[in-house]
Image (cartoon, helix red, strand yellow):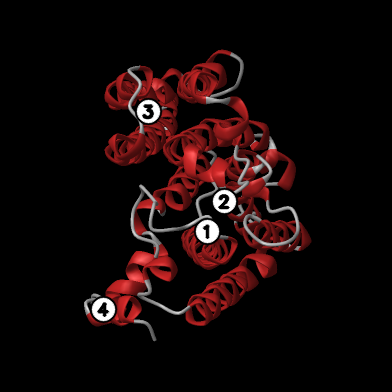
Amino acid sequence: MSTTTRSVVTSSPARWHAWLLAARPKTLVAAVAPVAVGTALAYNQHAFALRAALAALAGALLIQIGTNLTNDVLDFRRGADTAARLGPTRVTQAGLLSPRAVAIGAVVAFALAVAAGGYLVAVAGWPIALLGVLAIASGVAYTAGPAPLAYVGLGDLFVLVFFGIAAVGGTYYVQVMAALDRFSRWQALQAMPQALVLGVGVGALAMAILTVNNLRDAPTDAAVGKRTLAVRLGDGRTRRYFDSLIFCAFAVPVSVVVFGDLGAAVLVALFSVPFALDPGRAVAGGAAGKALNPVLGQVARLQVAYAACLSIGLVADRLLRAWVSGG
């Protein structure tokens, strides 16, 4: 062990804290937000099922953690994480945990996700099994293989699909299937298109978080051949892309009210607009490098506020309809 490595290990935080850093708790909102929205839509459609919702939440969190751990160790091995990194600490690069330990942690997280998914498969059948396999495979492929998704500019698509559309739609679907004794499958699945559209809104904000991260890291990523979408678009177009994602997120609740079957209460989601102002100004104003680190937190808080307000709106919509009908 070199003197530098020994110094890092000696001054490292407690081992549990190193694992907490590796799990990247601040990113886990991307897993919680779509499950909250999918569950609120299930309640809106009289299909809420607590055990299915909790299993979906556990699976989403574990897949996110497994993806984070895989990203940590493989980015280090590919040379993308170095001492020049501007973002939060990466435990493998910092010497807080060994690459082998982090890799084993990723396997354990994905294995636990499979265990959580077992109940969901029993409830909802092969579509959920297929979705789970694709989610885990994509989580690994994010930084693994000859053409990792994050290195060829497809990371944003992965986030939109698995932390937006599939997560909201899948959470809604498993609760519908668990509640089939209350009504027919056809009645329950009528709201599935709306679940997928709502997933676009949640996914757009998850993509916005990734965009800020990639905008900050674009110079160091380009130097090691990591061709994220921010590297491919360039600085100016990436900032405009960020604005378009925020706009898309807030266009979604309006669209499901205007073109769908949901009531105006869903527009409560727009109460989260003020949370978009500070990160929007920072990105438009040219914030770069370490100055983008607090912007990551601001966009994460925006996603929390958006998911919370949208969920409240979906619940309120059902309650208002029941009140109007006298039920």
Nearer-the-camera pick, 271 or 8: 8
Please state which of residues 224 and 151 is positioned toward the viewer in this rendering.
224
Q: Which residue is at a point 37% across and 28% down the rendered structure image? A: 323
Where residue 316 appears, x then y in whole percent? 37, 31
Q: Amino acid at mark 3?
A: Trp
Give neighbour class at mark 3: few <14, some 14-19, many 20+ (Cα, 10 Å).
Answer: few
- Kindly indicate the quadrant of the structure image that contains residue 302: top left
Which quadrant: the N terminus?
bottom left
Per the image, label 3 sits on a secondary structure element best described as helix
Tell me the element at label 1: helix
One can see residue 214 in this view: no
Q: Secondary structure at mark 2?
A: helix
The amino acid on which the numbered mark 4 sits, given as a three-letter code, is: Ser
Q: Quickly name the residue at label 4.
A: 7
Residue 180 higher or lower than 7, as above or below: above
Placement of 224 over or under 53, stated as above or below: above
Label whose residue precedes the other's in the sequence (4 or 1): 4
Residue at label 1? 60
Residue under the image location 36 percent in, 68 percent down: 94
Residue linked to disc 3 = 323
For marks 4 and 2, give the one nearer the viewer: 4
Of the image marks 4 and 2, the number of the one nearer the N terminus: 4
- Label 3 – label 4 distance at C-alpha: 65 Å
Residue positioned 58% across, 47% down in the render: 172
> How far apart are labels 3 and 2 at the CA level?
26 Å
The residue mark sitting in front, 2 or 1, is 1
Amino acid on which disc 2 is placed: Thr
Distance from the alpha carbon under mark 4 to that under mark 1: 36 Å
Circle 2 residue: 171
Q: Nearer the viewer, residue 233 or 41?
A: 233
